[in-house]
Amino acid sequence: MNPLAELDQLNLEPAAKNHVAALLQALLDQAAQDAKTIEAKDLKIGALTYELAYYKRIRFSTKSEALAPLQRDVFEEAFDTDIAAIQAEVEQLQDDPAGDTAGRPKRPRAGRQPLPDHLPRIEHRHEPESCTCGQCGKDLVKIGEDVTEQLDVEPAKFFVHRHIRPQYACRTCETVTAAPIPPAVIDGGMAAVGLLTWVLIGKFLDHLPLYRLEQIAARSGVILSRSTLADWVGRLGVALEPLAERLAWHLRQRDSLHADETPVSQLDPGNGKTKKAYLWAYRSNDLQPGPKILVFDYQAGRSGRHAQRFLQDWHGHLLVDDYSGYKALFATARAHPESSCLLEPCVELACWAHVRRKFFDLYQANQSPIAQEALNRIAVLYAVEADARELTSLGRQTLRAEKSLPALTDLHDWLHQTRLRTAPNTASAKAIDHALKRWPALTRYAETGDLPIDNNPVENAIRPIALGKKNWLFAGSERAGQRAAVIQTLLGTAKLNGLDPAAWLNETLEKLPTWPNSRIDELLPFDRGD
């Protein structure tokens, strides 16, 4: 139907007919423009909906093992941000032209976790403008409250402690008396314990270089030069070193350990470049009783002698990867690193996660049926560990004897038969050979109830260091690396034991100046349940 054509059939004055025709034409033009706008919005919403589905599929689909957990966290953070932004764009496009969103249904939200009870609450009461009914004028009666909570934060706040020590004189004796200066971990320093904790946590836990801490302080009008910050870090590293050494002693009292190492760049001033050093990590076994312990040892190289020197005369079950540097520890009799004495050999444990990773990479590359079958069989071993997670050591040993040992026997037979049918020097052959070569070390865990199946605990402990290297780039010297290892040892152990590293460090730095060495174990970052 054409409204303008029908207008000609009406008996109207020419002037009126022209006026009405102009109004109709304007309305038709506006309708056409609105239709184009709606069509464009529909197309945009459709595109955004498709993009949103794509991001959600990637975000919530099965994770690839090609990325380490912390790397996955970074990518998941980016995906979550993109999803929220796309949803906001869709909501804006769905608003009506007048901008009235009152009629638009609220977007469904997932249940939100309650905010922690230990946080202080600041109440804001919002009362109606009038306590009388707006319709009949009678007094309103309170029938309940609607309470919502929002989490807020206050940036680092600098303040000053003033220590006032009145001085008193005795006119008779001509002496002056005053209270002693409170002991401090850095004598005569201007930094209180809270500030020292802030610096160490920022540098070694949040991986912020000192120049960034300098900039953060400058935004609050506080001048903290990098040389001053560096002086504090150096002195604190020396003060905390006995605690790290004591942790290492306690670690060597355990009869099974994890070990791994990660490369670190170290500045080489003579050449104007960096050279490769290593941060060795040793961790206690979570399946055995006692506090969890993580110890870092910074060394200039990757030679196996560094592991021997750290472990000293320790012998027990050591779970490591296939790096040759550890092999001397498993010899029939090994030499003491600092004497001519012969030591008992350590017992090698191998990591099933490394074996699985080789088959996983193979399956990702070409969908290999051999790799898929190997992954399915290894999954059986991990399913047993999941079922045994809450069992005692004896219960875990019984379950492993019932399920893991038969599964391992079948897996070994399958690997051996498959290898006979596999061409040499192929990726499949190399993955199978890796497992068969270390088979005794791979199966020892299943004969007990307190040995771990893989080396993931120590690898997880190293990953934050590996991610932090992207910020601080290199260690300035070997001494700086050793100092970092001391502090990372203490903070890492505190985290493993469920402590707040900042709270533990703050309390320890307060106690340390007057604490007797005979009671040093009481300062270690263990959860004592008090």
Image (cartoon, rainbow, N blue to C red):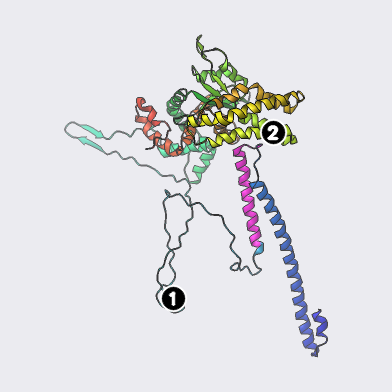
**Image position, residue 381 (x, y; %):** 60, 32
* In this rendering, position of residue 29 left or right of residue 205: right
Q: Identify the mark nearer the N-term, 2 or 1.
A: 1
Q: Which mark is residue 198?
A: none
* In this rendering, position of residue 471 left or right of residue 514: right
**Image position, residue 328 (x, y; %):** 58, 16
Residue at (50% x, 38% y) in the render: 202
* Dot 2: element: helix
**What is the magenta range?**
66-92
Q: Report, in whole angstroms, how far the alpha carbon at label 2 lies from the one at label 1.
A: 73 Å
2 vs 1, front mark: 2
In the image shown, does 219 or 5 lie closer to the viewer? 5
* Dot 1: element: loop
Q: Which mark is residue 133?
A: 1
In the image shown, does 246 or 183 lie closer to the viewer? 246
Question: How many residues crowd around disc 2 within 10 Å: few (fewer than 14), some, or many (20 or more)?
Answer: some
Q: Is residue 83 magenta?
A: yes
Residue bearing mark 2: 373
* Magenta highlight: main SS: helix
Residue at (54% x, 23% y) in the render: 318
**Image position, residue 337 (x, y; %):** 52, 14
Q: Quadrant of the C terminus?
A: top left
Residue type for callout 2: Glu
Q: Is residue 263 visible?
A: no
